[in-house]
């Protein structure tokens, strides 16, 4: 009898550990991470008025992406009633580069296979931005995460970008971005070269559209 109780307790412990890693820290954390060394942890503090001003600019741009189903909001489940909230804005030391976490709140009923037990569904995304005079140019590069709980999404964003981002590898099994977003070295890291290359490709594409529209095919929404 005593042995049976021990087995049951062990099974319960394993299940609880699975739920803990899956829903609190994210299953990827269980696989491995690369924490930022203390000496490189970013402690950038931004003035409240600047943060609010940037938040308004960012929110306006994200709303535009939402309304036109661009970047992370390409899915038609998003609509004018989707609620967007800025979870966090991170700044480079010169405040000219940003990374931000955004959470979208949507009715569960708009999902393809809705779960009637829940009223809302939350999706979390990370955007990267570059300051251009009075505007902020945003770009989206990565996948997001969804949950019926907002705090799970917020925790996933922090785990994924503060502990796991530095572990992403390229096709040659080399660390692709090298640093997490809470690392002071991140702001001069490889990701920004990738963003510059993408922007250059976009400029070239727009030039072709203007000069040779017959060579450009854009699928209808």
Image: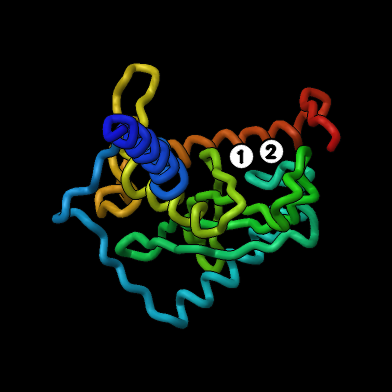
Q: What numbered label is drawn on residue 203?
A: 1
Relative horizontal placement of residue 93, taking residue 73 as reference (left or right): left
Residue at the spot 70% in from the left edge and 54% down from the top edge: 118
Q: Please say if 173 is above or below 83.
A: above
Q: Which residue is mark 2?
A: 206
Secondary structure under badge 2?
A: helix
Q: Nearer the viewer, residue 81 or 22?
A: 22
Question: What is the crowding at mark 2: few (fewer than 14 residues within 10 Å), some, or many (at least 20)?
Answer: some
Instruction: Tell which residue pokes out farthest to the top in this image.
Output: 172
Q: Quadrant of the C terminus?
A: top right
Residue at the spot 52% in from the left edge and 52% down from the top edge: 153
Q: Quadrant of the N terminus?
A: top left
Q: x%, y% of residue 169?
A: 35, 27
Q: x%, y% of residue 11?
A: 37, 33
Q: CA distance from mark 2 to mark 1?
A: 5 Å
Relative horizontal placement of residue 134, taking residue 61 as reference (left or right): left
Relative horizontal placement of residue 201, taking residue 217 as reference (left or right): left
Q: Nearer the viewer, residue 37 or 19?
A: 19
Secondary structure under badge 1?
A: helix
Instruction: Tell which residue pokes out farthest to the left in this image.
Output: 39
Q: Nearer the viewer, residue 133 or 137?
A: 137
The answer to whether residue 192 is seen in the rendering is no
Residue at the spot 73% in from the left edge and 42% down from the top edge: 75
């Amino acid at each position: 009898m005593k042995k049976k109780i021990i087995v049951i307790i062990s099974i319960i412990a394993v299940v609880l550990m699975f739920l803990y890693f899956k829903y609190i820290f994210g299953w990827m954390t269980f696989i491995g991470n690369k924490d930022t060394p203390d000496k490189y942890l970013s402690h950038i503090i931004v003035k409240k008025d600047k943060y609010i001003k940037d938040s308004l600019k960012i929110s306006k741009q994200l709303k535009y992406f939402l309304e036109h189903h661009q970047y992370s909001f390409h899915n038609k489940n998003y609509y004018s009633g989707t609620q967007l909230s800025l979870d966090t804005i991170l700044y480079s030391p010169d405040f000219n580069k940003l990374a931000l976490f955004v959470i979208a709140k949507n009715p569960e009923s708009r999902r393809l296979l809705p779960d009637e037990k829940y009223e809302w569904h939350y999706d979390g995304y990370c955007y990267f931005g570059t300051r251009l005079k009075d505007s902020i140019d945003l770009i989206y590069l990565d996948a997001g995460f969804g949950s019926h709980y907002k705090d799970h999404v917020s925790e996933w964003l922090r785990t994924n970008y503060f502990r796991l981002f530095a572990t992403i590898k390229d096709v040659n099994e080399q660390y692709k971005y090298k640093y997490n977003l809470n690392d002071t070295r991140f702001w001069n890291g490889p990701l920004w070269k990738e963003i510059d290359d993408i922007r250059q490709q976009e400029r070239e594409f727009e030039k072709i559209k203007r000069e040779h529209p017959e060579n450009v095919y854009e699928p209808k929404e």
